Image: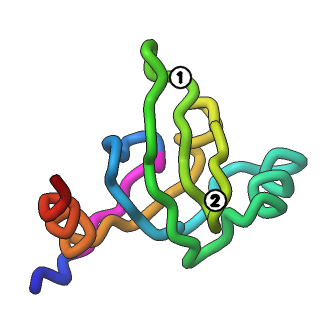
Amino acid sequence: MNSTQDIARLGALKEGQTARVKDILQEGTMRRRLQDIGIIEGTRIKCLQKSFWGDPVAYLIRGAVIALREEDSDQILVETVGLHRSAEGLKS
């Protein structure tokens, strides 16, 4: 089991990759909106699908599919866990 963790921006996740929220760099109203939809420290987020041009991106957050623009997702720091990435390889 690999427990190595990497800190990245949410926008850097690849389709199918899962991570946990580490911090929100955004301030003001947008920070509050992100928190209102459940993006708080420790929340699990899965990148579901990137649009054709890469912006926006659909994420699974607490059972809801949420689309975020790149400028907003890049303000969210997440930690990826090697175990999550390797588990994806088991899907067919």
For this view, does 40 lie left or right of residue 15? right
Q: What's drawn in magenta, residue-wise?
A: 5-10
Quarter of image, res 60 = bottom right
Main SS, magenta region, reads strand
Q: Residue at x 31, y 42 (%)?
A: 14
The verdict on residue 6 being magenta is: yes
Residue hosting label 2: 24
Residue 87: percent from the left, percent from the top?
20, 69
Mark whose residue sits in front, 1 or 2: 1
Find out whether the residues at labels 1 and 2 contact each other: C-beta distance under 8 Å: no
Amino acid of disc 2: Ile
First-in-chain label (1 vs 2) = 2
Amino acid of disc 1: Asp
CA gap between label 1 and label 2 equals 19 Å
Q: Residue at x 58, y 66 (%)?
A: 23
Query: What crowding class fits label 2: few (fewer than 14 Cα within 10 Å), some (14-19), or many (20 or more)?
Result: many
Q: Residue at x 22, y 60 (%)?
A: 88
Placement of 34 over or under 22, stated as above or below = above
Q: Residue at x 51, y 70 (%)?
A: 44
Residue 50: percent from the left, percent from the top?
44, 30
